[in-house]
Each structure stands twice: as structure tokens, then as C-alpha cells.
């Protein structure tokens, strides 16, 4: 294992332990329950939008699963909470692209945009683990779509 892989592994382990955003919201605007049927990871994601409906004000979640799914949810929460919806969906698309291309087609700009979520590039090389990493991101997108009353994210592949 090289130094970069070790650093990425430590980021994932730390995020799984910290569980940023864990807990229920008092008044969510949207909610999504997602399960990874392959391994049993699950999350109930809640979002609360700003009064003008343009920003994800708060994210709350409860879930259980492997360190990859829990770390991804924790990092995604830190990255997306407080962002405007367009920016949050752009981050979703970039992370999904990282997973879909196994990290091979990510630009340096996209790597920078992903911040700690870029640590999942190693995970992307294991198809059975991609669903673990995407679980919280899919739930965030679905809960946000529900909060807006529209499907902004497009169809799942």
C-alpha cells in the first residue's frame, strides 16, 4: 500500500467513525430510505431546504452498514449541507462519475471539487463496493427531489 492509499483509507475510517450529520431533523422537507440489497447497508436521509428553496439548509440521517457507506454519507453531508441545490447536484454528478469510471476519467478540477470524497477513488475499482459508496448520495438526491416536488437528478442507471 502506498502513502496515498494509506491516506485515503484513513480519511474513510475517520469519516465512518465521525458520522457527520447523523440524527433526525425536526421538520424535514424531503426524506429517502435507501437500502443496498447486495450487503444490507441502509440509510434514511432527510433534507431541509432554505426558505427560498434554493439551498440544502440541513441534512440528517440514520443508517447502518459498512465503513465505506457510513464514511461516504458522513463526507457527503459535510460537503453538501449549506450548498445551493445546483451545486449539491453537481457534486452528486461528479461523485457518480468517479464511481462509474473507476476514477479513470476524473479531471484535476473534479478531483479538487470532491475534496475528501476523492478518497473513494480506490473504492471505485471494486464494483461490489460502488453501491456502498453511492448509497448516501442517492438518498440525498432523492430526498432533495422530494423536497422540491420534482425529479432533478434524472433516471438511475
Image: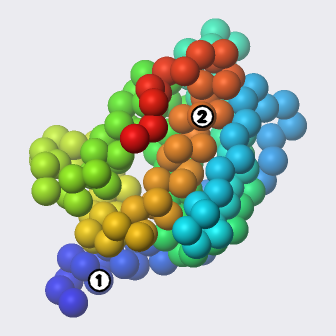
Quarter-of-image position of residue 103: bottom left
Query: Which residue is label 2 attached to?
Result: 142
Camera-nearest residue between 96 and 127: 127
Q: Residue at x 40, y 79 (%)?
A: 10
112 is higher (above) or lower (below) than 133: above
60 is higher (above) or lower (below) than 142: below
Residue, far bottom: 1
Camera-nearest residue between 32 and 9: 32
Tag on residue 111? none
Element carrying mark 1: helix
Image quadrant holding the C terminus, namely: top left
Q: Residue at x 65, y 69 (%)?
A: 40
Q: Residue at x 74, y 57 (%)?
A: 62
Residue, far top: 52
Residue, far right: 26
Is residue 84 in view?
Answer: no
| Residue 121, position as x, y percentages in the image | 27, 64
- Crowding around mark 2 (Cα neighbors within 10 Å: few <14, some 14 to 19, many 20+) is many
Query: Which residue is label 1 attached to?
Result: 6
Amino acid at each position: 500500500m502506498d502513502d496515498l492509499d494509506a491516506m485515503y483509507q484513513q480519511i474513510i475510517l475517520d469519516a465512518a467513525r465521525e458520522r457527520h450529520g447523523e440524527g433526525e431533523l425536526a421538520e424535514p422537507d424531503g426524506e429517502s430510505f435507501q437500502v443496498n440489497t447486495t450487503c444490507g447497508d441502509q440509510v434514511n436521509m432527510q433534507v431541509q431546504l432554505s426558505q427560498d428553496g434554493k439551498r440544502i439548509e440541513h441534512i440528517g440521517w440514520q443508517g447502518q452498514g459498512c465503513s465505506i457507506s457510513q464514511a461516504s454519507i458522513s463526507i457527503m453531508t459535510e460537503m453538501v449541507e449549506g450548498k445551493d441545490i445546483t451545486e449539491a447536484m453537481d457534486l452528486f454528478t461528479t461523485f457518480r462519475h468517479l464511481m462509474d469510471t473507476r476514477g479513470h476519467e476524473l479531471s484535476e478540477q473534479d478531483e479538487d471539487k470532491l475534496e475528501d470524497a476523492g478518497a473513494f477513488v480506490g473504492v471505485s475499482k471494486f464494483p461490489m463496493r460502488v453501491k456502498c459508496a453511492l448509497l448516501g448520495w442517492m438518498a440525498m438526491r432523492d430526498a432533495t427531489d422530494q423536497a422540491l416536488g420534482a425529479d432533478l437528478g434524472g433516471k438511475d442507471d
